Image: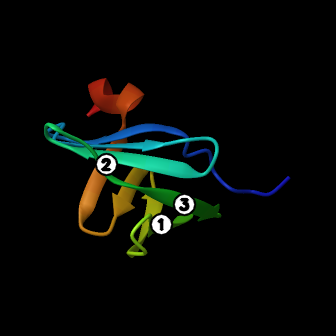
Amino acid sequence: MTDEIDVVGMWVTADGHIRQELRADGRYDEARGARRSAYTGRYTVTGNHLDYVDDTGFTATGDIRDGVLHHEHLVLYRESDEVRR
């Protein structure tokens, strides 16, 4: 098995406006405010680094640092960790 970290689950911004679900099948679904599935696509994990490819072909990256997902200019927290912030 690889040393990749577990990223599967719901990640949210502190204000709850952006919600990014990282699924076990390598797909993601990102909601923005009331707009469900604003962005969908696939992701891969290498160590603590994520590479995203949107269904439209747009690419982005992210990194998990200290249990926090830094996705381009966004900072997202595991939904289950929200009470710890």
Q: Earlier in the sequence, mark 1 or mark 2?
A: 1
Across and down, in percent, residue 24 comes to 62, 41
Across and down, in percent, residue 17 comes to 16, 41
Q: Earlier in the sequence, mark 3 or mark 2?
A: 3
How crowded is the residue under tag 3: few (<14 C-alpha within 10 Å), some, or many (20+)? Answer: many
Left or right of 40 on screen, residue 27: right
Q: Residue at x 34, y 42 (%)?
A: 77
Q: Earlier in the sequence, mark 3 or mark 1?
A: 3
**Residue that numbered label 1 is attached to:** 52
Left or right of 32 on screen, residue 65: right
Please tell me whether mark 1 or mark 2 is closer to you in this view: 1
Mark sitting on residue 9 = none
Please tell me whether mark 3 or mark 2 is closer to you in this view: 3
Is there a contact, CB below 8 Å, between mark 1 and mark 2?
no
**Residue that numbered label 2 is attached to:** 76
The answer to whether 70 is drawn above or below residue 31 in the figure is below
Q: Residue at x 69, y 56 (%)?
A: 4
**Residue that numbered label 3 is attached to:** 43
Left or right of 19 on screen, residue 80: right
Across and down, in percent, residue 44 comes to 60, 62
